[in-house]
Amino acid sequence: MENIIFKRRSIRSFEDKPVEPEKVERILRAGMQAPSAHNKQPWEFLVVTDKDKRDALSQMSPYAGMVAYAPVAIIVIGHPDSMTEKFMPQDLGACTENILLQIVEEGLGGCWMGFYPDMARCATITNYFNLPEDRIPFCVIALGYSQRENSFVDRYDASKVHFNKW
């Protein structure tokens, strides 16, 4: 299967090689193509390429160590309003998945680290990067040239599929 959906893996090891700005832009454009409740598009992005800032970001979650070695980290940030706040996790999840798929399309590897709804973790990002109070850091995506190839792993489990009744 050559479809990028089937090749996407969580990549945590990266080559020491910068990612071209045009690839980062296409990745962000893909994120912005995601569906959202009432088409509110409640996302913003903080792209972190500075090594010192990536090192700091890698310490903000016990699962974020690879950010120190990835040449790029994207922080997906929610900007909810009263109409879309309850749908924000769905909207930002769709946005994040689009980003992850475009990372594969660009010949790169990436890994999604959840921060929201752990508000203590979110606060570390908010405080360090001085985000506005009404913004919520949803997740961090480390990305770069992978040390291993994205490859297909069959995860289909027919026992989890039900037709017309349970």
Image (cartoon, rainbow, N blue to C red):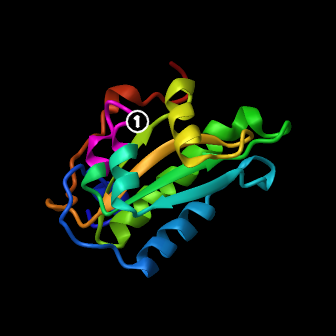
Tell me the residue at 19%/53% (across/down). 13
Find residue 8 and report its image quarter: bottom left
Tell me the residue at 56%/32% (across/down). 123
Q: Is residue 66 magenta?
A: yes
Q: Position of residue 11 (x, y in %)?
A: 25, 51
Q: Position of residue 42 (x, y in %)?
A: 71, 50
Tell me the residue at 35%/63% (across/down). 4
**Residue 107 appears in the rendering:** yes
* Vertical arrangement, residue 107 with respect to residue 129, above or below: below
The secondary structure that most of the magenta stretch takes on is loop
* Vertical arrangement, residue 62 with respect to residue 129, above or below: above
- The amino acid beneath tag 1 is Met
Residues in magenta? 58-67
Give the residue furthest to the left. 148
**Residue 10 appears in the rendering:** no
Q: Which residue bears the numbered disc 1?
A: 60
Q: Position of residue 118 (x, y in %)?
A: 52, 25
Q: Is residue 3 magenta?
A: no
Find residue 14 and report its image quarter: bottom left
Tell me the residue at 64%/56% (across/down). 44
Q: Position of residue 127 (x, y in %)?
A: 57, 38
Question: How crowded is the residue under tag 1: few (<14 C-alpha within 10 Å), some, or many (20+)?
Answer: some
Horizontal side of 36 relative to 124 (left or right) equals right
Horizontal side of 119 relative to 80 (left or right) equals left
